[in-house]
Image (cartoon, rainbow, N blue to C red):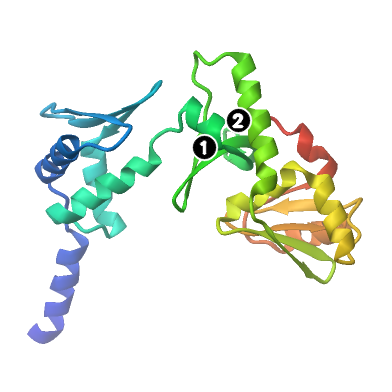
Amino acid sequence: MPALGAPLRLLTRLDRRTCDLDDLVAAAARLCAAGVPGLSLQLEDDVRRPALLVEEDERLWRVDLADLADELPSTGADLTPAGLDAVLRGLMARRPATDAEAARRGVAVLAWSGPAGDDLAWQVAVARGDRLVGWAPHPFTSALDVLTVREAARARAADVVVRCTVEGPVLLLDADAPLLATAALAAPEQLVARSGELGLLLAEGSVVVTPGRPVAWAPRTVTARLAGESSEPCVVLPWRELADLPWV
């Protein structure tokens, strides 16, 4: 019996591993000392709620280190000093996108929005490595500048590499990141023409957008069946309505 109990006790100890807040604060101090190009970093060393302040252009991002310490054990992250250093450096890729960054290289993609997170809207997104970060206009950004950024992002979406494959009556759109595949929908007329070249007529078709999956474009009867068979939340809409979707 003792031999059977030992692995259980080991699993229990592994499940209860924790991230020491002082170790995380020390890692944040090392990051501030080393610096990150283009960013201003400051450690807010409050005893109860220490935070890492990340400033870039007009954006200020506050990373609550106590909350992060609570979250890290469940992610399987390396909680050694070197591991925490890597976690914080990786976290910098999640910082809010600045207006200048969005204007320079943002692309238009479809994002999930609304109170329940199940509505679709256009959003300007910036690629940082293998991550996409959505841009939200700063409260002080003028309406004209917001419009300029969004139109540039819509035009830039045409440059995103999207793979188009035909499976029966369905055109599948995929990219290195599933969300990036929706960039092709910023110019749907081009996809109608391309599908015609592939032998698929979709002038009256609808699209099926499912989080984390390729976009499906097919005749309406087919998309209705696809949506009915899906166990995941999805949105089906005629492609002609894509341009009328709001912006986040």
Would residue 119 be found to the left or right of residue 24 on screen?
Answer: right
Query: Crowding near pointer 1: few (<14 within 10 Å), some, many (20+)?
Result: many
Q: Which mark identifies residue 102?
A: none
Q: Residue 101 at x, y = what percent?
A: 49, 32
- Identify the residue position indicated by label 1 in the image: 134
Taking the spot 65% from the left edge, 22% from the top edge, the residue there is 147
Q: Is residue 206 above or below residue 229?
A: above
- Identify the residue position indicated by label 2 in the image: 248
Q: Residue 12 at x, y = what percent?
A: 18, 66
Q: Is residue 209 above or below residue 174?
A: above
Taking the spot 13% from the left edge, 26% from the top edge, the residue there is 46
Q: Are marks 2 and 1 in contact (CB under 8 Å)?
A: yes
First reached walking from the N terminus: tag 2 or tag 1: 1
Give whichever of 97, 217 is nearer the camera: 97
Q: Amino acid at mark 1?
A: Gly
The mark closer to the camera, 2 or 1, is 1
Give whichever of 7, 174 is nearer the camera: 174
Task: Label 2: state its secondary structure.
Answer: loop
Task: Label 1: state its secondary structure.
Answer: strand
Q: Amino acid at mark 2?
A: Val
Can residue 187 be seen here? The reply is yes
Looking at the figure, which quarter contains the C terminus?
A: top right
**Inter-mark Cα distance, 2 to 1:** 9 Å
Would residue 228 be found to the left or right of residue 37 on screen?
Answer: right
Taking the spot 64% from the left edge, 50% from the top edge, the residue there is 160
Give whichever of 105, 169 is nearer the camera: 105
Looking at the figure, which quarter contains the N terminus?
A: bottom left
